[in-house]
Image (spheres, rainbow, N blue to C red):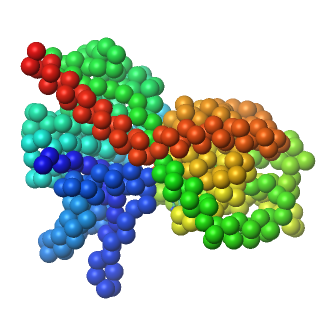
């Protein structure tokens, strides 16, 4: 029976060496949950890096054996590959370029070499397991060359590709020295998916101007094959967040937190440390709110969670310093004996704690400079069981296209950010409920399971269309 092979840079599991042997910790991420309905059924599998270096052959064999029992297959990467392919080309070339931070992009041939080599390694892993008729679904910017590599091995493969981060406009994309090879790599797929229509539009424009292949109604015809390009806004596991918020333990926890906070409103911000997230801009907005609106002092606390990430890289280290300084400045300027404006955490939290913060927060501040989708804002909405709460959302997040009932702002417009915070602080309950209800309806319907099935159906559709064109 044909199977589905999912491929992403990371497997939805973390393998670690412990004193008592190997330990396996499964991921709770949205993608893992959504795709769980696929790779855990029939003969389907997930291929990716297990997150730890295994250089010893016996150990590799053990990991492969253990993982295959959970329908996963590891691609073992070396320290040098992770340095040049992952930290290098993926995170220092593609990530800044695709998030419109080209000034941070490093153009290094060694990184590019490693990127090609690791994509080839993934291709080999796919070829070892793929059989005729299988469906192959490649994920994200670390594996842009993989669709075409697989296509060259097996011309008739069914290949889907989904990019989780933005696709920039042609003027930004063209700055990459390897722009043509990258596009041709992606065009090996039958279906290329993005979170938004704008990403899809930018991709089509780059394909037409760089590769010379034009499109009509989201279909590219390269003379041999039709390639479909479309938007698939990713949803969350709505039920999971709603039921976590409804649990008994949560009610206890919320009561305790509310008592500690007295009558203060809670603003919440949760991000990985990254320049694309607009954390300093958000802090400046909050500072301006306290400065211009003394009536809100001691009436609001900003809970700001920053999850450590890439902090060996210079831009990230500098960003961390900027955030530390801003938090220090704001807290020292405005704090009183009984109130601290910002509760700043530089660490990650267990899911239950995160869910409690979502349920507790009166206002969520999700103001990235650029974000493919952003799941935090969706998780906040799903956690508001009583439908109170206000979402302040950046227009530059993919999620803004669906969540038009949020207070949408341009994160570069500090004045607009302060105005939105002010509006959120005083928004009547009824209006909060109305907005929240609309957003919940959308997220409940278009959840992660819906996203997976829509993508897979569309992939089937384009394949059938290609076959019928071939027999005409
Ligand atoms: C890419 C794109 C796109 C955060 N802190 C903690 C924690 N989280 C969880 C959140 C959420 C996830 O991490 C972050 O969501 P993002 O949407 O930012 O997703 P990424 O994987 O970072 O990034 C992005 C996404 O792919 C999906 O296509 O939306 O635009 O950049 O789920 O809840 N989870 C726990 N503790 C934390 O401290 N347990």
* Residue at 78% across, 40% down: 430
x%, y% of residue 150? Answer: 15, 40
52 in relation to 436, above or below: below
* Residue at 29% across, 20% down: 219
Res 71 quadrant in image: bottom left
The quarter of the picture where the C terminus appears is top left
x%, y% of residue 426? Answer: 83, 42
Q: Is residue 272 left or right of residue 234?
A: right
* Residue at 55% across, 56% down: 241
- Front residue of 25 and 88: 25
Residue 2 visible from this viewpoint: yes
- Front residue of 107 and 410: 410
* Residue at 86% across, 41% down: 292
Q: Is residue 458 left or right of residue 98?
A: left
- Front residue of 26 and 2: 2
Residue 102 visible from this viewpoint: no
347 in relation to 280, above or below: below
Q: Is residue 468 left or right of residue 228?
A: left
x%, y% of residue 191? Answer: 28, 31
x%, y% of residue 272? Answer: 52, 53
Q: Residue furthest bottom?
A: 20
């Amino acid at each position: 029976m044909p199977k589905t092979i999912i491929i992403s840079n990371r497997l939805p599991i973390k393998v670690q060496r412990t004193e008592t042997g190997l330990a396996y910790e499964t991921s709770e991420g949205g993608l893992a949950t959504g795709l769980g309905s696929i790779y855990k059924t029939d003969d389907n599998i997930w291929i990716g890096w297990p997150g730890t270096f295994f250089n010893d052959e016996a150990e590799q064999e053990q990991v492969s054996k253990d993982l295959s029992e959970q329908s996963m297959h590891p691609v073992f990467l070396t320290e040098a590959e992770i340095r040049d392919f992952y930290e290098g080309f993926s995170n220092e070339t593609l990530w800044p370029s695709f998030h419109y931070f080209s000034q941070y992009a490093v153009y290094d041939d060694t990184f590019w070499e490693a990127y090609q080599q690791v994509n080839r390694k993934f291709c080999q892993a796919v070829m070892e397991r793929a059989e005729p008729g299988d469906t192959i679904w490649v994920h994200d910017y670390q594996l842009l060359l993989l669709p075409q590599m697989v296509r060259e091995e097996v011309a008739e493969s069914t290949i889907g590709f989904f990019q989780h981060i933005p696709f920039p406009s042609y003027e930004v994309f063209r700055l990459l020295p390897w722009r043509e090879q990258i596009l041709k790599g992606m065009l090996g797929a039958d279906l290329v998916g993005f979170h938004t229509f704008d990403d899809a539009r930018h991709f089509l424009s780059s394909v037409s101007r760089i590769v010379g292949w034009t499109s009509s109604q989201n279909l590219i015809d390269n003379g041999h094959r039709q390639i479909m390009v479309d938007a698939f806004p990713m949803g969350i596991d709505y039920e999971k967040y709603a039921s976590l918020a409804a649990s008994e333990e949560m009610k206890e926890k919320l009561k305790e937190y509310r008592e500690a906070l007295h009558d203060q409103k809670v603003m919440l911000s949760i991000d990985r440390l990254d320049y694309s997230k607009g954390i300093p801009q958000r802090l400046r907005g909050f500072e301006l709110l306290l400065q211009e609106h003394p009536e809100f002092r001691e009436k609001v606390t900003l809970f700001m969670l920053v999850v450590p990430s890439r902090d060996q890289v210079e831009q990230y280290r500098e960003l961390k310093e900027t955030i530390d300084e801003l938090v220090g400045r704001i807290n020292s300027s405005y704090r009183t004996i009984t109130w601290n404006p910002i509760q700043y955490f530089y660490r990650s939290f267990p899911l239950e704690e995160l869910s409690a913060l979502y349920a507790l927060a009166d206002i969520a501040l999700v103001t990235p400079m650029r974000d493919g989708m952003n799941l935090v804002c969706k998780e906040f909405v799903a956690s508001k069981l009583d439908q109170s709460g206000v979402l302040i959302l950046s227009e530059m997040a993919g999620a803004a296209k669906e969540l038009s009932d949020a207070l949408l702002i341009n994160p570069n417009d500090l004045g607009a950010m302060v105005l939105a915070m002010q509006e959120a602080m005083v928004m009547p309950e009824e209006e909060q409920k109305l907005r929240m209800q609309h957003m919940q309806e959308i997220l409940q319907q278009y959840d992660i399971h819906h996203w997976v099935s829509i993508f897979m159906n569309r992939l089937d559709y384009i394949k059938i269309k290609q076959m019928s064109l071939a027999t005409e």
